[in-house]
Image (cartoon, rainbow, N blue to C red):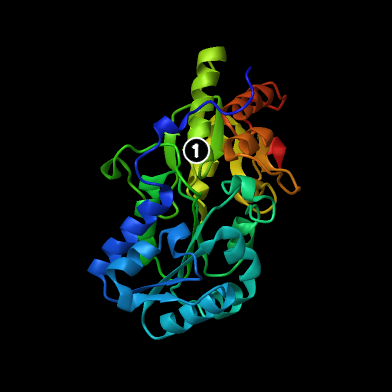
Amino acid sequence: MASGMTYTMTETSQLSTAEYYGKALCELGAEHKDVVALTADLAKSTKIGMFGEKFPDRFFNVGIAEQNMFGVAAGLAKNGLIPFASTFAIVASARSLDQVHTDICYQNVPVKIIATHAGTSFGQAGSTHHSLIDMTCMRVLPHMTVICPCDGAETYHAVKAAYETPGPVYIRINRGFDQIIYKNLEDCSFEVGKAKVMNEGTDITVIACGSCVYQAIQAAEMAQADAGIKVRVLNMHTIKPIDEEAVMSAVMDTRRIITVEDHSVMGGLGSAVAEVVAKSGKACAFKMLGHQDEFSTIGLHEDLMSIAKIDANGIAETIAEVMHQDFEADDAWDDEF
């Protein structure tokens, strides 16, 4: 099996994922006068500047002071506004965690954090700029909703849903362009906390989020073509609150689970799914794909995904491995407690 990614950029849309965010935010701004936007000198990179061009009186650039930005956002929210604040994902989750924890989550104010350049999508910027811990940091904060959309169209709908979602919301998106899963905005339906079945299957389930959803779909097609393996693919776009019903349905129906994320396997999607499975007391073959308790290296995003085995080829290899794992395949669960 060939190594590396299997797609080309010709399959992407004309808008970057962040531009879909900017488009949705501008529409929210036109519909709701309580929407305001904040940047820490990254208006162009995060595309929140699109809002600033249309609504300059509701747009605030606090300078290179991300911690201050979240404090200001919390204050605006305390005064009845709905702030959207954007910076890079590693900065939102690491440098600014104290302010997000205390100013935003502790007070349970409706600040919507749209963090770009997530995972290893910052590529050649290097390990310090890759964000492999942000879902972990945000998932443990009380009141915080955590979302990881799979492409531009789903990002658009996630941003719209964030406005309607009570309390703080964290949405992580990639730098640049994502592979198209939904060709049109109308093709994508989105509900916070409800996973989407992207491919039906009864042999094994791959649960993915973000850019890994496209790769999981490709891997499912490869497994079907190569070995006749029927792979269920779940787009778990909401990490918190996670769709426990979809997870348990996968456990009961397929008894084999693989999670895939461009994030550390510690505390992210894989951990969230494992918590649901462990709490249920049901046994299944289980494998977490992602970054394995290590810093990422420097390189193109597609190469870094290949190294972590979260591209289509890596997922397909893991599907084959997990299909050969031994476990009690009968339907009698009583002896497994």
Q: Residue at x 28, y 67 (%)?
A: 54
Q: Residue at x 33, y 43 (%)?
A: 188
Q: Is residue 26 visible?
A: yes
Viewer-closest of 118 and 192: 118
Quadrant where the C terminus sits is top right
Viewer-closest of 162 and 120: 120
Q: Residue at x 49, y 50 (%)?
A: 243
Quadrant where the N terminus sits is top right
Q: Residue at x 53, y 25 (%)?
A: 6
User: Residue 163, position in %: x, y?
Assistant: 36, 66
Disc 1 residue type (three-letter): Val
- Count of numbered badges drawn on the protein: 1
Q: Residues within 10 Å of mark 1 (few under 14, many from 20)?
A: many
Examine the rendered structure and indicate whether residue 120 appears above or below residue 43. above
Q: Is residue 283 visible?
A: no
Q: Circle 1 is placed at which residue position?
A: 213
